[in-house]
Amino acid sequence: MDNCNRRLQLQILIFPASRRVSRRPIAIGRGLTSLLPVFRTAHAASRFGSPSCAEKAPQNPSSRAFCLVSRLSFGVMQIWCMEPYPCGDRRLPHHVFPPKKLSPDQLAQKTGVQYFKVDLDDTVAMKKRLSRVKAERNVSSSDVFTISESIADFNDKLEEFYEPQQRADDVVSLVIDGSCYYDVEPEEDEWIRVQLERGDLLVIPKGLSHRFTTTPKNFVQMQRFFSKKPDTQG
Ligand SMILES: CSCCC(=O)C(=O)O
């Protein structure tokens, strides 16, 4: 064994993998340091879309990694380009590589999709925003839609909602609790993923191909607004 290999082996013996991860960034504080392995798992999950790599992603869909990373995004809506043929769990992020994020303005320019942040605790502001969207989008009714893994046909529902749809009316949704993804397809096989959380209001213009799924939290409650009766929308 040459000197170089001997040094490498010594390093591995002295700092086994789990310790090496948490040693280097000690200067940034214990709290964040302890999150690093979590970030790494989540990053791996989001970076890779191939079947082999998807297997490296957290197996438990309501994983701690996802919840922590999503909480650390500080409530700003996240939008990114998705790989065209995602393999494995559709609730994983399936970023293109290298990841490409979009701003709400870029999303609007590219797809016509509009996004608003609504402060659900400020009733006056919320009503103002909603009545504007309702007037502009010709909304005549709404319902409250909840999906969670406690419902009997949860997986069937997810299958159903992940089928690409094109609606004759705008799709208007306000997330009241939990989180979800809407994927929109401005060009064939070019998917953009929008992650919505509490207070996010999204308007998908009529005719734009889109699909829906939960995040790994498996729970979302949202108010959906219709220009026709809700029972026409499944
Ligand atoms: C969970 S509601 C989402 C369904 C949908 O995308 C649609 O109705 O077009």
Image: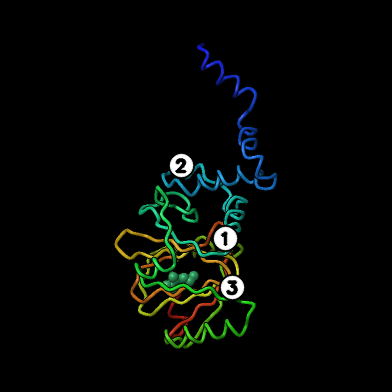
Secondary structure of the residue carrying tag 1 is loop
Q: Amino acid at mark 1?
A: Asn
Q: Earlier in the sequence, mark 3 or mark 1?
A: 3
In the depicted view, which residue is nearer to us: 232 or 55? 55
Q: Where does the image place residue 65, in percent across and percent down from the top left?
A: 59, 50
Label drawn at residue 176:
3
Q: Does 48 sit left or right of 17 as displayed?
A: left
Q: Which residue is found at the position 42% from the left and 65% from the top?
A: 211
Q: Residues within 10 Å of mark 1 (few under 14, many from 20)?
A: some
Q: Real-space Cα distance between discs 3 and 1?
A: 14 Å
Which numbered circle lies on residue 218? Answer: 1
Q: Is residue 136 above or below residue 52?
A: below
Residue at the farthest left position: 188
Q: Amino acid at mark 2?
A: Cys
Q: Nearer the viewer, mark 3 or mark 1?
A: 3
Q: Residue at x 46, y 72 (%)?
A: 115
Labelled disc at residue 53: 2
Q: Quadrant of residue 21?
A: top right
Q: How is the image coloured?
A: rainbow
Viewer-side residue, 38 vs 21: 21
On the rendered structure, is 28 left or right of 117? Answer: right
Query: Could you say where residue 95 lies in the image, as x and y percent from the top left?
Result: 43, 52
Q: CA distance from mark 2 to mark 1?
A: 22 Å
Secondary structure of the residue carrying tag 2 is helix
Q: Secondary structure at mark 3?
A: strand
